Amino acid sequence: MTTILVLNGPNLGRLGAREPEVYGSETLADIGARIEASVPDGIHIDLRQTEDESELIGWLYEAVDRGTPVVLNPAAFTHYSYGLRDAAALLKQAGVPLIEVHLSNPHAREAFRHTSVISAVASGVIAGFGADSYLLAVEQIVRLIGASDARA
Ligand code: DQA
């Protein structure tokens, strides 16, 4: 069984009720269920959410130590958390994939959302497709894992 961590930053626990015109009407649990339904057998989705920067950093350490690939929606931390960025850089250094996702397209929104301090150390970024951003990211992680298995 291969685990993919799907990590979520602040206020994403309020999806469904939070600005549905921007983020859609699905809850994070709904999105988790859709991801689980989409993955091949043998892939386990571990979905987590926190308001706490240090908890999120701890989860990235866990991913580094276990070699677990990550789909990360850093939410507002995207735009200013150098601590989170430095933790994400550890995944890059370890060769563990991390895909940054956003439900909305931050570049089409307020200026403060145009900067991501995470993107430069992410394997890639998927944004603007609502909950499908997560599904696309998980699909790509599965592809990347398959590719690295094939090389092994
Ligand atoms: C978000 C975009 C961020 O700017 C915002 O702070 C969020 C959600 C997104 O998924 O579109 O909380 O990461």
Image: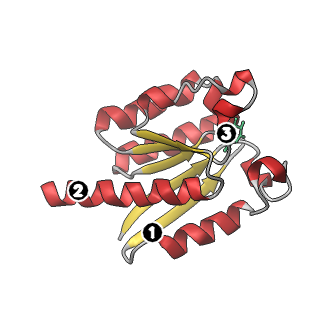
Mark 2, residue position:
147
Q: Amino acid at mark 3?
A: Ala
> Residue at point 43% right, 35% down?
122
Mark 1, residue position:
44
Q: Earlier in the sequence, mark 1 or mark 2?
A: 1
- CA distance separating discs 3 and 2: 29 Å
- CA distance separating discs 1 and 3: 23 Å
The residue positioned farthest toward the left in the image shown = 152
> Residue at point 55% right, 24% down?
117
Residue 74 location (% of width, % of height): 61, 39
Callout count = 3
Residue 75's mark? 3
Q: Earlier in the sequence, mark 3 or mark 2?
A: 3
Q: Nearer the viewer, mark 1 or mark 2?
A: 2
* 55 relative to 144, above or below: above
Q: Amino acid at mark 1?
A: His
- CA distance separating discs 1 and 2: 18 Å
Crowdedness near tag 1: few (<14), some (14–19) or many (≥20) residues, C-alpha within 10 Å: some
Check if mark 3's residue and mark 2's residue have beta carbons within 8 Å: no
Residue 149's mark? none
Q: Quadrant of the C terminus?
A: bottom left
Quadrant containing ligand 1 reads top right
Q: Would residue 152 be visible to someone looking at this image?
A: no
